[in-house]
């Protein structure tokens, strides 16, 4: 528990940078699982600062984003492609061909093969060294809404009404929010060697309490993380407010 989002985000950026530099020293690629939304913005800002001021290089980094709305054009302001470019990729030296984000432009019948290929690409890259997660107020990680199973893989999902209403602020009107998304599964996330989940602010306090203190259940997919061998939950005092 950190005194503020700013302090917590710097800690997370350091952990990510450590994975990158350790791999660099071994001449290997670092495979990062990345999240979008408001939670990781300061983490990415700090990584950009480390790149610009401390020479942190992303030349050996391969990234896989958790999710994308469906349907979604990459150049739309709400797309996660646009978000990642604006908040991270345009400001660092990552190779464009090493960036992977689920494709919101696919035809319906192309989605299943795309998802299978996405899983295979993660495996071919050597698996996720570290996965960064936020948490939705439904208890989702990625867009694995309540009902998602432990072994779920990358797939098309329907968004929960609460997730849609939380997303409305980015889409002007709730009715413009896509009803569906493509997301890595809980099983995909659980295979990461290391996981860091971040949450900031009082609004996340009730769901953080459930994730940490309640029984593992599909009703709160983030509770599955209790079974992971190497997970850190990094939150501010406000998000910790409901913990026992
Ligand atoms: C985003 C994602 C979601 C968000 C979650 C929290 O890629 O997978 O699980 O992390 O909805 O969103 P924010 O950070 O906006 O509160």
Image: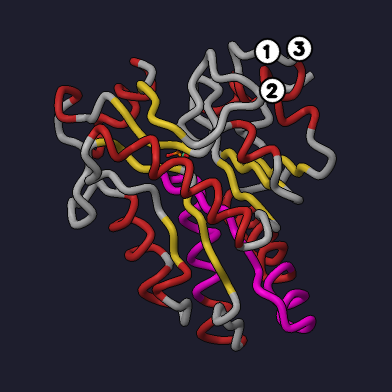
Q: Is residue 11 above or below residue 190?
A: below
Ligand 1 has an atom within 8 Å of the beta carbon of the residue at disc 1: no
Q: Mark 1 or mark 2, which is nearer the start of the sequence?
A: 1
Name the foreground residue: 239 vs 41. Answer: 41
Left or right, 214 with respect to 97, comes to right
Tell me the colour scheme of the image.
secondary structure
Quarter of the picture holding the C terminus: top right
Q: Secondary structure at mark 3?
A: loop
In the rendered image, which residue does mark 1 sit on? 217
Q: How many marks?
A: 3
Q: Secondary structure at mark 1?
A: loop
In the rendered image, which residue does mark 3 sit on? 215
For the record, the magenta segment spans 19-48
Q: Position of residue 132 (x, y in %)?
A: 60, 49
Residue at mark 2 to residue at mark 3: CA–CA distance: 7 Å
**Contact? badges 2 and 1 (CB < 8 Å):** yes
Image quadrant in which you'd find residue 191: top right
Name the foreground residue: 126 vs 137. Answer: 126
**Contact? badges 2 and 3 (CB < 8 Å):** yes
Quarter of the picture holding the N terminus: top right
Q: Nearer the viewer, mark 1 or mark 3?
A: 1
Residue at mark 2 to residue at mark 1: CA–CA distance: 6 Å
Q: Secondary structure at mark 2?
A: helix
Instruction: Give the residue at x 61% y 86%.
Output: 54
**Contact? badges 1 and 3 (CB < 8 Å):** yes
Q: Mark 3 or mark 2, which is nearer the start of the sequence?
A: 3
Query: For the residue carrying disc 3, how many other residues have a C-alpha within 10 Å: few (<14), some (14-19), or many (20+)?
Result: few
- Is residue 171 part of the magenta span, yes or no? no
Identify the disc placed on residue 223.
2
Q: Position of residue 59 (x, y in %)?
A: 55, 82
């Amino acid at each position: 528990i950190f005194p503020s989002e700013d302090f917590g985000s710097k800690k997370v950026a350091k952990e990510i940078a450590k994975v990158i530099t350790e791999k660099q020293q071994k001449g290997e690629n670092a495979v990062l699982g990345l999240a979008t939304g408001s939670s990781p913005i300061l983490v990415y800002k700090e990584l950009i600062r480390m790149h610009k001021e401390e020479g942190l290089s992303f030349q050996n980094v391969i990234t896989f984003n958790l999710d994308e709305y469906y349907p979604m054009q990459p150049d739309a302001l709400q797309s996660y492609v646009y978000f990642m470019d604006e908040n991270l990729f345009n400001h660092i030296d990552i190779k464009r061909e090493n960036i992977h984000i689920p494709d919101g432009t696919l035809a319906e019948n192309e989605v299943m093969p795309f998802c299978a290929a996405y899983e295979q690409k993660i495996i071919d890259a050597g698996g996720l060294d570290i996965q960064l997660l936020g948490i939705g107020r439904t208890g989702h990680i990625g867009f694995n809404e309540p009902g998602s199973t432990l072994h779920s893989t990358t797939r098309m999902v329907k968004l929960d009404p609460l997730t849609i209403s939380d997303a409305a602020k980015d889409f002007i009107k709730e009715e413009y929010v896509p009803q569906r998304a493509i997301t890595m599964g809980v099983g995909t996330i659980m295979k990461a060697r290391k996981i860091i989940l971040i949450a900031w602010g009082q609004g996340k306090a009730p769901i953080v309490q459930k994730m940490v203190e309640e029984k593992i259940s599909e009703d709160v997919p983030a509770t599955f993380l209790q079974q992971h061998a190497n997970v850190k939950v990094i939150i501010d005092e406000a998000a910790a407010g409901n913990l026992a």
